[in-house]
């Protein structure tokens, strides 16, 4: 399979900035959006870190469209439109453009669900599912079931942009964001589409979403030190507009960068061996030797325990770290973690990492903030201007993936 694709558009919105430019400026200035959630949501371990987007969309909404999309669907719509416009994809036949996104579920505010719960209690006051299905569900808003379907938001985005090629939506975690790229790259390679809008959105932070993240072991408690590069729950969305190289050349559009390698691996319950294998496989798919790699951008839904533990050789972990695999192969990259400033952005992580890699190429180095840059003890990173970055994601279940991004 040929993975090379031209990056012709990019956009993001995060807790550090309403757009990609302001997000990058905040990162370069050393800012972090992480703050402690007001309670220890999700069970034991203390209050988690969260990076939240401040907007007006809090609580119940009368806007039926927003009720269906959720706040994260609205973020996805915003960034997809920006990337689509930057790439000038309306110039292509609408059947030749696809949409591939990872998107989480909509959590209804408790006040919307409470009437249905109250109407479904048994004599002891416990929730009785038979009572719920017998009539308690009628207390829910009629649009509530549809709001749980990610393809509703994806369909809304496609309709708004008049995209009539593939329309694929996946679950919300970071590995799903990587699968969205895999589907898009395969479609570009086979000629199913000539261009693709690819990325995802993290579901909004709520008590319910924090419980899900806690159970998936993807949260750090707020008492973790500032040197920990593992983040908390982040909010935001990011997408790239990709185009087949021949199609981009024929249109004469500016190429912002290249997506030239990709790979995914899975090791049940052990994300780090999978991450190392995926990283090396992505380099191999692009026929790039490890020593030519300049940056590794870490993002995903598996925290990096103990700060640098799994990145350092001789760390406390008994499992091999990602750094071990890369260093053993001859790579001497600089490592950057986005989670320490933006939190875990789930399915938006791969697209955001790739988008920010282009800024790092432009300025010649990654941000120097302690929350985003990892100084690997005992290893001196390359001092050359970065031209190649590997975006690496992993999940607690053992799935991992990597994208190789190259400067234009």
Image: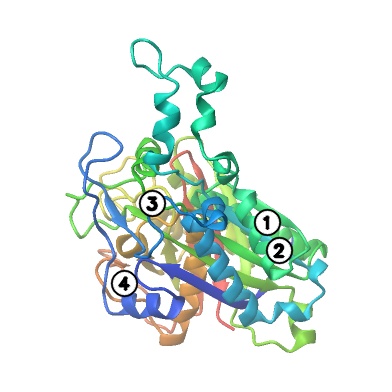
Contact check, label 4 and label 1, Cβ < 8 Å: no
Specify which label sits upstream in the sequence, 1 or 3. Answer: 3
Contact check, label 2 and label 1, Cβ < 8 Å: yes
Q: CA distance from mark 2 to mark 4?
A: 49 Å
10 Å crowding of disc 4: few (<14), some (14-19), many (20+): few
Quadrant of the image occupied by residue 177: bottom right
Relative depth, front residue between 75 and 198: 75
Q: Is residue 307 left or right of residue 66?
A: left
Q: Examine the rendered structure and indicate whether residue 330 appears above or below residue 207.
A: below
* Residue 386 makes an appearance in the image: no
Q: Nearer the viewer, mark 1 or mark 3?
A: 3
Q: Please give the residue where the numbered disc 1 appears in the rendered image.
A: 155
Specify which label sits upstream in the sequence, 2 or 4. Answer: 2
Q: Nearer the viewer, mark 3 or mark 4?
A: 3
Specify which label sits upstream in the sequence, 4 or 1. Answer: 1
Relative depth, front residue between 290 and 2: 2
Q: CA distance from mark 4 to mark 1?
A: 47 Å
Relative depth, front residue between 92 and 400: 92
Q: What colour scheme governs how the chains and residues are painted in the rendered image of this protein?
A: rainbow
Q: Please give the residue where the numbered disc 3 appears in the rendered image.
A: 59
């Amino acid at each position: 399979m040929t993975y090379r694709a031209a990056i012709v558009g990019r956009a993001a919105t995060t807790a550090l900035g309403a757009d990609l430019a302001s997000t990058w400026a905040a990162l370069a200035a050393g800012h972090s959006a992480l703050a402690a959630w007001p309670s220890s949501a999700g069970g034991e371990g203390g209050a988690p870190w969260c990076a939240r987007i401040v907007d007006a969309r809090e609580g119940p909404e009368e806007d039926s469209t927003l009720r269906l999309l959720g706040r994260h669907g609205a973020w996805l719509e915003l960034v997809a439109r920006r990337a689509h416009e930057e790439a000038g994809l309306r110039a292509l036949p609408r059947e030749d453009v696809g949409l591939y996104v990872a998107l989480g579920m909509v959590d209804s505010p408790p006040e919307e669900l409470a009437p249905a719960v109250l109407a479904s209690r048994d004599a002891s006051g416990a929730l009785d599912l038979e009572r719920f299905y017998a009539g308690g569900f009628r207390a829910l808003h009629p649009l509530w079931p549809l709001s749980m379907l990610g393809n509703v938001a994806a369909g809304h985005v496609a309709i708004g942009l008049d995209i009539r090629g593939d329309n694929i939506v996946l679950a919300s975690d970071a590995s799903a964001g990587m699968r969205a790229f895999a589907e898009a790259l395969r479609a570009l390679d086979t000629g199913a589409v000539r261009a693709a809008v690819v990325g995802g959105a993290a579901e909004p932070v709520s008590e319910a979403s924090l419980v899900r993240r806690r159970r998936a072991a993807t949260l750090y408690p707020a008492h973790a030190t500032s040197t920990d590069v593992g983040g908390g729950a982040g909010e935001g969305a990011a997408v790239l507009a990709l185009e087949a190289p021949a199609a981009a050349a024929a249109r004469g559009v500016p190429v912002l960068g290249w997506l030239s390698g990709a790979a995914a691996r899975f090791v049940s319950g052990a994300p780090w061996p999978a991450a190392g294998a995926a990283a090396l496989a992505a380099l191999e798919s692009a026929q790039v030797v490890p020593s030519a790699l300049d940056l590794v951008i870490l993002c995903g839904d598996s925290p990096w325990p103990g700060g640098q533990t799994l990145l350092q050789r001789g760390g406390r972990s008994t499992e091999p770290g990602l750094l071990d695999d890369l260093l053993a192969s001859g790579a001497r990259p600089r490592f950057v973690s986005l989670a320490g400033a933006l939190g875990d952005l789930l399915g938006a992580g791969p697209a955001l990492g790739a988008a920010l890699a282009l800024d790092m190429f432009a300025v010649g180095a990654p941000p120097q903030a302690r929350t985003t840059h990892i100084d690997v003890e005992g290893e001196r990173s390359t001092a050359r201007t970065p031209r190649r970055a590997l975006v690496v994601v992993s999940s607690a279940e053992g799935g991992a993936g990597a994208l190789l991004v190259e400067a234009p």
